[in-house]
Amino acid sequence: MGTIKISVLLFVVLCGVVRIAAQTPQTNKQIVIAASTVLDGKGGVLHNTRIVVEGSKIVRIDPNATPVNYDLRGLTVLPGWIDSHVHITWSFGPDGKNAGAGGTTPYATYAAAANAWATLMAGFTTVQSVGSLNDLPLRDAIARGALPGPRILSSAEPLIGSGEQSGTPDEIRAFVRKQKEAGADLIKIFAAGSVRRPQMLLSQEQLNAACDEAKKLGLRTLVHAYKDAVRAAVLAGCTEIEHGPLATDDDLKLMVQKGVWLDPQAGLVMENYLLNKDKFAGTPGYPEEVFPTIKEMIPIFHSFFKQALKTPGLKIVFGSDAVAGSHGRNAEEFIDRVRDGGADPTAAMVSANSLAAEALRMGDQIGSIAPGLEADIIALDGDPIKDITAVRRVVFVMKGGIVYKNAPR
Ligand SMILES: [Zn+2]
């Protein structure tokens, strides 16, 4: 009985494949976008110009290009945002409760596809998903043009630190190689507990093995770390620290010296737990008793964000840590960073544009409005530099030369 229903649904999905694939841009067909204000993704602003797109790429910036296909004058045009830290498959289940990121039922699968759609509609044209093998088929379906969604980079299965049980250095190296074989674009490592229990879950030797093996394979390493684990990950040669509170000023200075990226959070993830308390409380990993303490944790994240901003030369990227309930609301993290964390609005935009692209080692492909780059272009109704809440009003989304959203004005 259920099987027939599933087959019908699959047929509908396959029909959708054909339609969306047909939207693949024709090479040589030129699209001209007129704009009065363009944030170039690197901190610069262009006025009264036109962006010319051919196929999936921006080919030139030319104020005289005609004919205009999309008139975005009066809006703020910028590169599609990059969220360096999401959990794209993480959803609420049919009972409305937190179902985590690992579900493989048809319900969970469609929920993940819906997360991807919501994320793209919110202006995020690339995301880095850190923590589930289920990311991979979704990533590949989107890359084929079979489903609409952001470009996804995935860590496949994360290395979850659990002391000696995490394995010997050789076993850890084998785990890293296994993720590469499974198709991981990067390696995600949990090296510490939480802000409440920040103890290290991997030894220095284990971290050294994980980050060294990844480096040999050409993969970046993103390390969930608090307190002492921050320094240990930096010393191990890992690429990027996720979260980071309770690290010292000296730890942050060492990150600058070693060129390690930081992806801190200034609010959305905690606010989302409070907003969806009834859906999370009592589900695995979310005991009821932690909820009263979440409010107390928010200032710890704010003060760490400010501490990071005060560290000269520290490369801070945008990552929302979107879980169930925050897909499509990723941009709320910009508001938290600017309003509560004191970030400069231009720096906040760049942290999700060229800087994030550089952290992904994709700066020559995405993150800027420049000839030769992918045509990932969004427009906001408002100016985020003057009013950061404009990030909530994404009215135009183009990814790889295809327009997915063009809301009437
Ligand atoms: Zn996360």
Image (cartoon, helix red, strand yellow):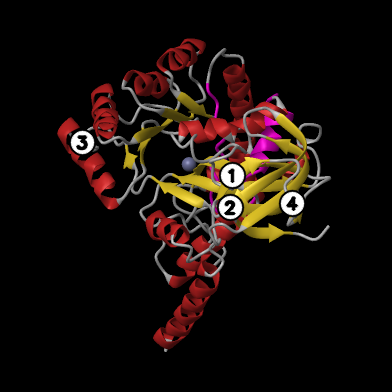
Packing grade of label 1 (10 A; few <14, some 14-19, many >=20) is: many
Packing grade of label 2 (10 A; few <14, some 14-19, many >=20) is: many
Element under disc 3: helix
Q: Residue 336 lies in magenta, yes or no?
A: yes
Q: CA distance from mark 1 to mark 3?
A: 42 Å
Packing grade of label 3 (10 A; few <14, some 14-19, many >=20) is: some
Q: Are marks 4 and 3 in contact (CB under 8 Å)?
A: no
Instruction: Indicate which disc, 1 or 2, sits on the residue closer to the N terminus.
Output: 2
**Residue indicated by mark 2:** 54
Residue 69 % position (x, y): 73, 57
The residue carrying mark 4 has its beta carbon less than 8 Å from ligand 1 = no
Element under disc 2: strand
**Residue indicated by mark 1:** 59
Q: CA distance from mark 2 to mark 3?
A: 43 Å
Count of marks, rendered view: 4
Picture quarter with the C terminus: bottom right
**Residue indicated by mark 4:** 66
Q: Residue at x 63, y 34 (%)?
A: 41
Instruction: Indicate which disc, 2 or 3, sits on the residue closer to the N terminus.
Output: 2
Amino acid, disc 2: Glu
Residue 239 % position (x, y): 39, 28
Amino acid, disc 1: Val
Packing grade of label 4 (10 A; few <14, some 14-19, many >=20) is: some
Q: Are marks 2 and 4 in contact (CB under 8 Å)?
A: no
Q: CA distance from mark 1 to mark 2?
A: 6 Å
Q: CA distance from mark 2 to mark 4?
A: 13 Å
